Image (tube, helix red, strand yellow):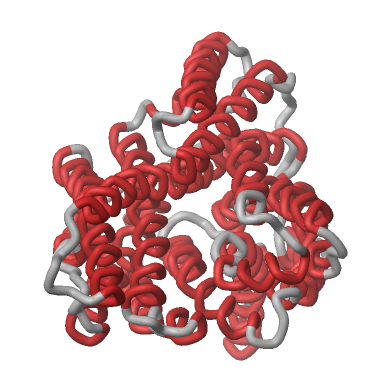
Amino acid sequence: MSAQELNAPPTRIADPAAEAVAQEQHRRRLKIALGVIVACQMMVIIDATIVNIALARIQTSLHFSASSLAWVQTAYSLAFGGLLLLGGRAGDAFGRLRLFIGGLALFTLASLAAGLAPSAGALVAARAAQGVGAAFAAPASLALLATNFKEGPERQRALGVFSMIAGLGLTLGLVLGGLLTTASWRWVFVINVPVGVAVIALARPYLTETPRQPARFDVGGAIMSTAGTTSLVYGFIRAASDGWSDTLTGVTLAVGVVLLLGFLLVESRAEQPIMPLRLFGERMRAGAYINMLLMSAAMGSFFFFLSIFLQKVLDLSPLRAGLAFLPMALVQFGGARTAPKLLARFGPKTITTVGTASALVSAVWLTQLDGESSYPGAVVGPLILLGLGIGLAFMPLNMVILAGLPLRDTGSASGLLQCLQQVGLALGIAVLTTVYGSSLRSSAHHPDAGLGPQAQIHHDLAHGIATSFFVLVAFVAVALVVAVLVFKSRKPAAARV
């Protein structure tokens, strides 16, 4: 039996008992199909953060220098972010299931190579290969969801689960990183291997392949989008470590902007563009893309700096710091589970606005952190509010972006969505790191005479983090304005039943 037949709605059967069995089999197949898609998405998202807590042990084991250690993370981010637009369009042209399986196979093999890496260079190369695999598998996963789940309540439920996993991935990466590193840093990579093998084995039997779109591949657009996005992401990453005044930072950012502007010009003239500009022709979809960038910038900087606060100011161990994010993960789970029902009743504008407002309150609260702040009094509340905000906001954004798209554009739309997430993560950390560094330098010149050495360190770190969170407030505030002014009150096609 083909995958199309497995996933097709069951035909009506005269015998009620037989019809009930057929309906149950159909639901089971859809559950497995959704499990395959979200397992892939979980792996590529978790891999963006799971390595953070293992970095200290990796440095000792493989003799990384302090300056080169960042490439363990940077190699993955650059390859992933830089190739996402190409990965999305390639799925449209060559078949999304084919790209999904191929990308995931590369990601799984690269994970094994990273776990067995004998040297620093081998690990960095394996991380780059992981990013390449993720860049082709991730856009295909979201496009396959749109293909295998018909518009309406069925797709809303699937998108709710997908969005929940996407939001939880970064949080769970911190928790899993702490747990696995206690055994060996190599486990943070090897854990992907059995999951990847299982997903690949189940993909073809349970997922429907999409027809290949006859295409003249947009080579110019592919080269310019990949080079431009890679340059931009690298510029943001370098700004976080070397500052905005660094010459190479300025050059790479300028080159990235010029290449992406040229890319837009090429796309406007291309017969079959890698990123169709018609994706921005619908007002709500354009607003959803903007908010995905802003909320991703907020999330990336939130995780990065709150992890520093928990470990450097509250003196939590890496494992306890990872577990400290569990309240947020639980609320995210509940919010994402509830979002589809709320969306059907109130529409995407209301749910996105409420979720973004909750995240904004969380960000404002975090600007009050200081050296005397405690986990129960100053951290748990913002974690819960941000978890609720992400749980509610991300599912409507994904839905609005995919709603009403023709089949030929779903891969490109998915690739662009995830590209903006990666650019947002790098942008948020870069901007907040600049503010954080300036605050630390200012504190060093104006120490508090009444504080002891350790208390002074805690005070300076907390003040720098709280100051940087004012930028977090700005990101979320702009996202809230977009949700209120750009989103329409009507429900898009995917929300109507």
Q: Which residue is drawn at 67% across and 47% down?
A: 75
Residue 98 is left or right of residue 407, and the answer is right
At horizontal 73% and vertical 54% (from top left) the residue drawn is 127
Give the quarter of the figure containing the N terminus: bottom right
Position above or below: 424 against 443: above
- In this rendering, is residue 438 above or below 198? above
| Observer-nearest of 112 and 209 | 112
Residue 352: horizontal and vertical position, in percent?
25, 56
Q: Is residue 11 visible?
A: no
Q: Residue at x 54, y 64 (%)?
A: 49
Decide if residue 480 is in sight here.
Answer: yes
Does residue 29 appear left or right of residue 342 in this picture?
right
* Towards the viewer: 468 or 456: 456
Q: Residue furthest front?
A: 449
The spot of residue 487 in percent (x, y) is 22, 42
Q: Could you tell whether 447 is left or right of 496 in the image?
A: left
Q: How many marks?
A: 0
Residue at 24% over, 70% down: 456
Q: In which quarter of the image is the C terminus?
A: bottom left
Residue 52 is situated, as x and y percent measured from the top left of the image, at: 56, 66
71 to 116, vertically: above or below: above
Q: In which quarter of the image is residue 72?
A: bottom right
